[in-house]
Amino acid sequence: MLEVRDLEVAYGDLQVVWGVSFDVPERSIVAVIGPNGAGKTTTLRAIMSLLPVRGGTVSFRGKPISGLLTHQIVEQGLVMIPEERATFAGMTVGQNLELGAYAKRARPHRDETMDEVLAIFPRLAERRKQLAGTLSGGERQMLAIGKALMARPELLILDEPSLGLAPVVVEATFETIRSIRERGVSVLMVEQHVEMTLEVVDHAYILETGRVVGDGSSDELRHDRRILDAYLSM
Amino acid sequence: MQLVIQSAISGLLIGGMYGLIALGLALAFGVLKVLNVAHGELVMLGGYVTFFLVAVVGLDPFLSMPLVFVATFGVGVLLYLVLFRFVVRFDIDTRIKNSLLISFGLVLILQALAVTFFTADERAIITDYSTAALTFESIRVPFIRLAGLLVAVALSVGLQQLLDRTTFGHAIKATSEDWALASLAGIDIRRVYLVAFAISAGLAGVAGTLIALGFSVSPSIGLGWTLKALIVVVLAGLGSIRGLIVAGMLLGLAEGLASVWLGGAYREIVALGAFLLVLLVRPQGLFGRRE
């Protein structure tokens, strides 16, 4: 569904992503794991055209998307939740959700999608008139996911969904990610919580200093010595 | 006492103009993160467009306002496409610096063009009702300036409604809060930037009409109004549209009272003093939200 081939990304002269390739098949959950500064976020931002791509290609459903602008990529059905600050703090929960359906592909279905999203997250319905900036961390996470679902994604990209959240909330988030896939949405996520991530995903790629150094199904990786040593030693 | 009241009223009325000019300046700054110091030159341009619509076409100045809005909106579109489009590609800190350089250049160009095409003469629009005023005892409230204040209030309410009530308004607010997150929501931020900048220019144009009517126009009036509007933006704080007109009127009031009590020379000092005081005591502005 999503094919990333030989992706190269740089900030000015500083190249941080070197020839990264990976695939997200239809109806799957794929993770890119790796330590801080490995280029995970940079890779996602480049896929969404928030950063210029220096080389390589990104295609979605066989069509190249590398040259498109961010909102045009969203129109194709790729929706990303950035890490932190993923909601508009100065706007209400309801306005945030409505903005989630701003894309042309989603706007005609706004009201029905809203009902679906509020059914998944009843808490958001209670908080509808409240400013997003006043929500708790967990509620803000629900809003970020709800807002992304409002765009009717075919592929949902999450950048470190567990960042800064309490363990209970992280667990709930991962549970939500599973249920999103059951609705036919594919998921690409970047994570540092390797142990938990491997419980949810089908396949994971390991990114280190801007290069893919390994990949495998979650079962394989769970028994991979390198992974055990590097990430699961705690 | 009457002199004090008269100065206070004049101050409040001119303050409405400060507020209206600040409205456009704050819109461009809030959404595009560009500081357009040539905003006053757009006011000047609006003044001349009005002057010619009145003098040549024979239109009533108040009726000319929609046309002036459209004309300066168009100038805004042009300036965005030719200049500011390139500025908004940078990160936010760079945008402010680059926009200052570009818009200072624009100030010089627009002033020179205005001298060439309109001459350096000071012009004012005279109508049948130019001298009409509401009088209480010996206190005069000139009709034109009062109408100007009402127009300023109406435009600020209109802009607030646009931002609060329409989907595109929400897109403008979202872009102003976080452009990357806005584009991830499927918003074409280039279009938001274009429209916000053009509205900003259109508001400056209408302010120009009111200034040509209630005050006067010459090619060099721009920077003075820009400076006042900048002070008002800081006084009000970002994110407060209603606060801009109120802050403008407060600034006008302070200037008016200062000129009676301390003498005309102190007007500007009071304005800058108020600016510094607010920055010291309440850096988020009188009506702004604390970040």
Image: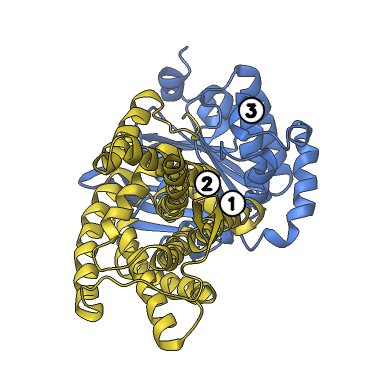
Q: Is residue A5 left or right of residue B288?
A: left
Judging from the image, mark 2 belongs to the subunit labelled: B
Residue identified by numbered label 2? B241
Residue at the spot 43% in from the left edge and 31% down from the top edge: B284
Tags 2 and 1 touching, CB below 8 Å: yes
Residue at the spot 29% in from the left edge and 48% down from the top edge: B96
Residue identified by numbered label 1? B160
Which numbered marker is on residue A55?
Answer: none
| Image quadrant in which the N terminus of chain B is located | top left
Q: Where's residue A232, x and y in %?
A: 48, 18
* Chain that is coloured blue in the picture: A
Around disc 2, counting alpha carbons within 10 Å, would you say few (fewer than 14), some (14 to 19), or many (20 or more)?
many
Residue identified by numbered label 3? A135
Which tint is chain B?
yellow
Q: Nearer the viewer, residue B90 or B125?
A: B125
Around disc 1, counting alpha carbons within 10 Å, would you say few (fewer than 14), some (14 to 19), or many (20 or more)?
some
For label 3, the SS is loop
Question: Which of the marked residues, 2 or 1, is nearer the chain's N terminus?
Answer: 1
Q: Is residue B102 left or right of residue A63?
A: left
Q: Where's residue A124, x and y in %?
A: 73, 34
**Amino acid type of the residue that numbered disc 3 sits on in the rendered structure:** Leu
